[in-house]
Image (cartoon, rainbow, N blue to C red):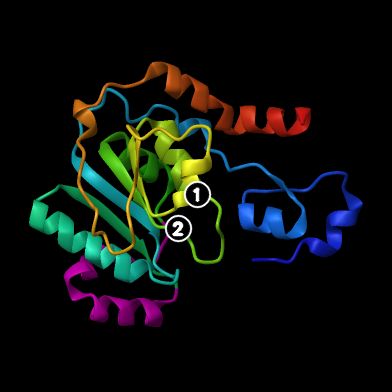
Amino acid sequence: MSNILPYCDYFTKVYSFDPQDCQKYGLHYYPLFYLKDFENVGIKKRKLFNMSFIGSIYNSGRLEFINKWFQKIMILKLSHFLYLYAPGRLRGINSKLRYRKMSNYFFFNEISMNEVINIFSVTDAMIDHQMNIQSGLTIRTFETLGSGLNLYTTNEQILKEPFYNPERITIIDVNLGNFEFKNIIEAKIDKDWQESFKKYRLDNWVKNIISI
């Protein structure tokens, strides 16, 4: 959201997690990371929710997408956790009125990190809606995969990543026409894949950036 281009000349290398920016401005691509707190928190835990979404509502098309997803999971009778962060009380109230069936899931304060981690630990899968201001993968993507959960995402960029695994990652379109729930409890945890994903844990991520 900020223009860093005037500062690029002061550095030997500049990295971005946005592949389109990298291609357009000649930057070096490297995706995001997850905090150690999330690591494997969802593995071998009793699940309360089939699917969860935690995030801000102020991204183009996100509320419409979440509303369609919410209708789908209600029809499918999937257990869920939904936290729609709506900063700006007036705007948030307008959104609550517009989406009345989801009105109980709008909140004016950010959810704490501890609560986010707790929700991850009792969830089968997280759903991710990419931001319109970037082409890169969201940090929620890495938190989900680092936690050992299944990921449903609208961002097809993930298909190009070396860690893409169709057994763990499901691409869905924004209209949810191809949405189908897969129960992660029935899936075998790939320990080797989970171990390889640790390169995106923040401490290892920093070491890799430094070594590069």
The numbered mark at residue 157 is 1
**Element under disc 2:** loop
Q: Position of residue 42 (x, y in %)?
A: 32, 30
Residue at 64% over, 32% down:
205
Judge left or right: residue 118 versus residue 74: right
**What segment is highlighted magenta in the picture?**
88-110
Judge left or right: residue 188 versus residue 199: left
**Element under disc 1:** helix
The numbered mark at residue 203 is none
Q: Position of residue 174 (x, y in %)?
A: 33, 62
Q: Quadrant of the C terminus?
A: top right
Relative to 9, does residue 51 appear above or below in the rendering?
above
Q: Position of residue 28 (x, y in %)?
A: 73, 45
Q: Which mark is first along the chain, 2 or 1?
A: 2
The residue indicated by pointer 2 is 130
Residue 91 is covered by the magenta coloring: yes
Q: Quadrant of the N terminus?
A: bottom right
Residue 4 is covered by the magenta coloring: no
Dot 1 and dot 2 residues touching (CB under 8 Å): yes
Residue at 39% over, 17% down:
191
Amino acid carrying label 1: it is Gln
Amino acid carrying label 2: it is Gln
Relative to 130, does residue 46 appear above or below in the rendering?
above
Q: Nearer the viewer, mark 1 or mark 2?
A: 1
Structural distance between the alpha carbons of marks 1 and 2: 10 Å
